[in-house]
Image (cartoon, rainbow, N blue to C red):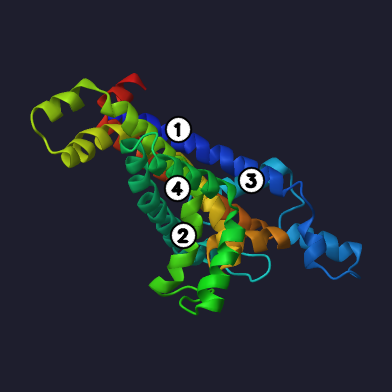
Amino acid sequence: MRRYITRQLVQLVVVIIGISLLAFSILHVIGDPVLLLLPQNAGKEEYERYNKILGLDQPVYVQYWKFVSRAVVGDFGKSWYTSTPAFSLVLERMPPTLYLTFAGLGAAMLIALPLGILAALKRHSFVDTLCTMLAVAGQAVPIFWLGIMLIIVFAVRLKALPASGYGTWQHFLMPAFSLGTFLAPITMRLVRSGVIEVMNMEYIKTARAKGVAERMVVIKHAFRNACIPVITVVGLQFGQLLGGAIVTETVFAWPGVATLTVESIRNQDFPVVQCAVVLLALVIVTVNLIVDVIVGLIDPRIRVGG
């Protein structure tokens, strides 16, 4: 198990380095931030002075080395607009985004697990067809449209929930549901197919022959063995949930790091964007590492075969 975790940690470091290099390269080809910082009537001397202050007059590889060497100790520089440390800005906005993402993940599981098991147990019935239709509809509905519809119904018409903001559990309901519908369909289909496959195994027949209650057969034996691909996919989809949080935060005026990143990209605030991308990538690969370890603990054949 120790070798398995070490191998995963090495992969984590390689991925972080690759993402930092990619983010740094893309930001340095999309435009000139000095032109945004200076007034339109600024002269060439002032332009060159700002270029030197920001360190943009140095070769790109030198800029990248300085960025990496400082980022290792948590120094991503200061925002070019607010002069606030980029790490502090991003870290302040990170908790709301993570809370929203995990809330969306929880909503997806609450939707997908019962429906997936029910569809598997009622295979080829009306219930199975209805669950499949819901899964297709969930994948087809855009997050922003669903969010707007929820605001119109529950905030504007019924006045039951706040339309935007962050702070109480009521603020989480609509954004979490909107984000959860993004992951629920694929998870439900995986649970359905996994349970159907496992229910035909010999140990399920043996458990039934021993008189084990059907509920325990499904939960303890069938679902436990069918959950490995579900856990793996949830880990892989976690990054997409963070991506979906960008849209969700915009619709519900959620004060998260995704909104900060979009604003910083628009303003070409390189230090903030680079810090946000690296920290979000670190969160994603850490979650994937945890998922890999959990799957390896559930099924030792995976870590041995890997």
Q: Residue 11 has which mark?
A: 1
- Judge depth for marks 3 and 2 and give the one in front: 2
N-terminal-most mark, 4 or 3: 3
- Contact between labelled residues 3 and 1, with CB atoms less than 8 Å apart: no
Front-most of 252 and 302? 252
Q: Inspect the image, locate mark 2, and give the three-letter code of the amino acid beneath it.
A: Phe
- Write the residue at 45% across / 47% down: 184
Q: Residue 184 has which mark?
A: 4
- Write the residue at 76% across / 46% down: 29
The residue that mark 2 highlights is 177
Which image quadrant for residue 275?
Answer: bottom right
Assess disc 1: are there few (<14), some (14-19) or many (≥20) residues with their C-alpha within 10 Å of its C-alpha: few
- Contact between labelled residues 2 and 3, with CB atoms less than 8 Å apart: no
Q: Is residue 116 left or right of residue 93?
A: left
User: Label 4 vs label 1: CA separation?
Assistant: 28 Å
- Judge depth for marks 2 and 1 and give the one in front: 2
Inspect this view and state whether residue 14 appears: yes
Q: Inspect the image, locate mark 4, and give the three-letter code of the amino acid beneath it.
A: Ala
- Judge depth for marks 4 and 1 and give the one in front: 4
